Amino acid sequence: MKFTGEFEVKADAGSVFDFLTDAHRMASLVPDVENMEVTESGDIRMTVRVGLSFIKGRFNLRMRILNRIPKSHAEIQGNGSGSGSSVDFHGYCDISEEQGRSRVKWSADVTIGGLAATMGSRMVQNASEKYIAQLVESFRKAFEK
């Protein structure tokens, strides 16, 4: 599945880039995180509680921030598994700034396997879009404080 979007925040590009590439700050936006650690190699590992229809439980995720271009670009690659399902993803964020506001254009390629893949693409896509909207709104609110 492919997801794309863009949003604006009241912050300069450097602040937005710093937030996007800070594992602890980004993890604070992810709903239902039970634990999170950053390894010496830079991998981000977290356990998240999930619930999608009849699939409920814990999901173990591993992510890495790649291709950092200060103030303008970052990529996040990861995978995870749990509750009989799996996910692989690769996301891109491009940041531009104008008059103290930053526009973040993002896209993500997501592959879902296991039980979640048997649920039907419409249900999985709708749930994914809702989850992404929640992450974007949390990110925006982080800059309104």
Image (spheres, grey):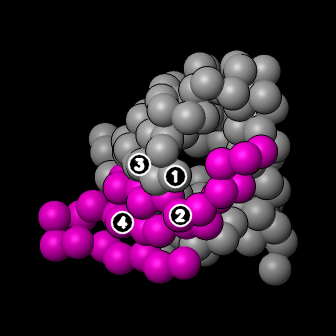
Q: Residues within 10 Å of mark 3 (few under 14, many from 20)?
A: some
Q: Main secondary structure of the magenta part?
A: strand
Amino acid type, residue under disc 3 in the picture: Gly
Q: Which dot, 4 or 3, sits closer to the camera?
A: 3
| Position in image of residue 107 (x %, y %) | 59, 29
Task: Please name the residue that numbered disc 1 is placed on.
Answer: 83
Q: Which dot, 2 or 4, sits closer to the camera?
A: 2
Task: Please name the residue that numbered disc 3 is placed on.
Answer: 80
Disc ID at residue 58:
2
| 1 and 2 marks in contact (CB < 8 Å) | yes
Instruction: Indicate the quadrant containing the C terminus: top left, top right, bottom left or bottom right.
Output: bottom right
Query: Is residue 23 within the magenta segment?
Result: no
| Position in image of residue 102 (x %, y %) | 70, 49
What residue is drawn where x is 77% and y is 39%?
A: 127
Image position of 31 (left or right of 108): right
The residue lying toward the viewer, choosing from 86 and 118, is: 118
